[in-house]
Image: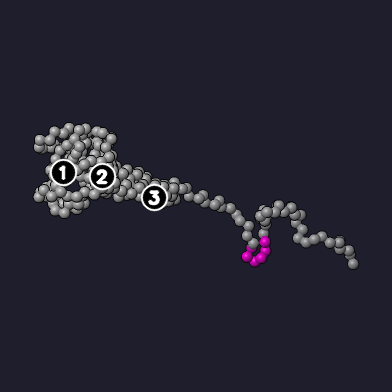
Amino acid sequence: MAEDRTRRGWMLVIGVILLVGGLIGAGALWYAGGQRLDDNVAAFARAPSGCATTLDFERTGEFTLYVETSGRLNDLSGDCVAEASYDRDDLESADVGLDGADGETVATEPTESASYDTGTFAGTAFAVVTIEESGEYVLSVTPAGEQFAVAVGGDPNAGVALLRWGAVLLAIVALIGGGVSLVIGSRRPAPAPESGDAWQPEPDGVTTWPIGPPGFPAPPPTTGASAPAGPPMLPP
C-alpha cells in the first residue's frame, strides 16, 4: 500500500509539472511568435515620401515593397525633410522608382502578397522587385505632401507560423499528458474484499452445515435421533 501511495504521489507531481510547465511554455512560444513579427517588420528599410533614399542591398533576391501608412523613421541623412512618425489610412499604393548605381531603373511588379499591423507599423504590399546585384540603390517615393513611407523587406510573417504551431502542439501535449497523469495519481485503489467463512463441501463428500448453506434457512434443532422412528418392538 505504501508503494502504491508513493507511485500515485509521483504521478500527481508529474501531472502538475506537465500541465503548468507545458502551458507556460506554450504561452512563451505564442508570445515569441508575436515578437518575431514585430522584429521582422522593424528590420525593414524605409524610404519616406517626397524623398530619394539610398538603400544598401547586401544580398540579392526578391524583395517586397509595402506602402506604410503608420510607423516611424530612423535617423535619415541628406537634405530631405521628413517627419519622424506618420499615421494615415487613406493610401493603398505609391509611385516609386528604384535606380541602381549605374543609373538603370529596376522594374517592379504589382502584388498583394501580404500586410502587417504590429501596433507601431502598419503596411500593405503593393509591389515586388528582384535585385540581381548587391549594392546601393536609390528609392524615390512620390507623391509628397501628407507623409507616409515605403518599407522594403521580406515576408513579415516569416517564422511566425512555426512558433505559433509549436505553441498549439505544446499546449495539447501538456493538457493530455498532464491530465492523464493527474487522473492516474488521484485514482484510489479498489478496497480489498472482506474475509469470511465460505461454505465448502468436505473432501470425503460428507457435507457439514455449521450454520446453514448459503441461501438456505438454518436447520431445525434435532432430538438426537439418528434414524427415523419406527413401530415399537414387541416381545416374542
Q: CA distance from mark 2 to mark 1?
A: 15 Å
Residue 152 shows in this picture: yes
Judge the density around disc 3: few (<14), some (14-19), many (≥20) Cα neighbours within 10 Å. some
Dot 3 falls on a residue whose secondary structure is helix
Q: Which residues are magenta?
A: 202-207
Kindly identify the residue that appears in the image at 34 percent across and 44 percent down: 23
Kind of residue at badge 3: Gly
Q: Which residue is mark 1?
A: 139
Kindly identify the residue that appears in the image at 13 percent across and 44 percent down: 138
**Disc 2 or 1, which lies upstream in sequence?**
2
Kindly identify the residue that appears in the image at 27 percent across and 40 percent down: 92
Q: Is residue 6 magenta?
A: no
Is 114 placed above or below 49 here? Answer: below
The quadrant of the image that shows the C terminus is bottom right
Kind of residue at badge 2: Phe
The reply, left or right, for residue 213 in relation to residue 9 is right
Most common secondary structure along the magenta stretch: loop
Q: Contact (CB < 8 A) between labels 2 and 1?
A: no
Q: Which residue is mark 2?
A: 126
The location of residue 221, given as percent across then percent down, is 74, 52
The reply, left or right, for residue 181 in relation to residue 97 is right
Q: Is residue 206 magenta?
A: yes
Q: CA distance from mark 3 to mark 1?
A: 54 Å
Residue 8 shows in this picture: no
Q: Which residue is mark 3?
A: 177
The reply, left or right, for residue 24 in relation to residue 64 is right
**Disc 2 or 3, which lies upstream in sequence?**
2
